[in-house]
Amino acid sequence: MPLRHDWRAGSDAGVLENAREVRRLFEATVSRAKLDYGVEADSLTLKVKHVLGKEPTPENIPELAMALEELDRCVGIPHVKNVIKEIVVHSQENYRRELRGDPVIHLALHRLFLGNPGMSVSWG
């Protein structure tokens, strides 16, 4: 949730340092929810799905679909392809966990893929 992420990014004391940014995020979330779900402004009751947005699937996120298609066109690198697909599945599971109100499972997103240059990677 954006508010939760902003809180974690704040100072060590856990104080929201920029209330205007929180308000801007909240207003953007309300606007997006109205557009995404076709809801009138007066009848909008925010739910977790409004704050999180749509589930992170290739069908819902065109940029993700394009990136996965480009990755699939690469020759070789099966380990890299599997790791990237696992990250996508992990983000989908965390989305569902947040919808249920369960704590998310944190995942380090930095990766290092080792190997000699030109040995098994061809971009096609």
Image: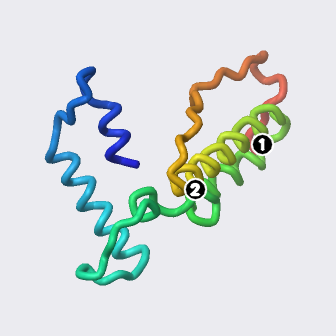
Q: Is residue 25 left or right of residue 68?
A: left
Say which element carries label 2: loop
Q: Nearer the viewer, mark 2 or mark 1?
A: 2
Toward the viewer: 68 or 2?
A: 2
- Give the structural element (helix, strand or loop) at label 1: loop
Q: Which residue is mark 1?
A: 74
Across and down, in percent, residue 19 comes to 15, 44
Which residue shows up at 83% across the image and 36% down it? 78
Dot 1 crowding, Cα within 10 Å, few <14, some 14–19, many 20+: some
Looking at the picture, which amino acid does disc 1 mark? Cys
Instruction: Give the x, y percent position of residue 35.
Output: 37, 75
Disc assigned to residue 27: none
Task: Please tell me whether residue 84 is drawn above or below residue 120 in the rendered image.
Answer: below
- Establish if 4 lies above or below 63: above
- Residue type marked 2: Pro
Quarter of the image with the C terminus in it:
top right
Tell me what residue is drawn at x 62 percent, y 58 percent.
Answer: 57
Apparent side of residue 120 relative to residue 33 in the rendered image (left or right): right
Does residue 86 appear to the left or right of 36 in the view shown? right
Name the residue: 62% across, 51% down: 92
Q: Is residue 23 above or below residue 43?
A: above
Dot 2 and dot 1 residues touching (CB under 8 Å): no
Indicate the position of residue 17 as horizontal and vertical percent values: 17, 33
Q: Which residue is mark 2?
A: 56
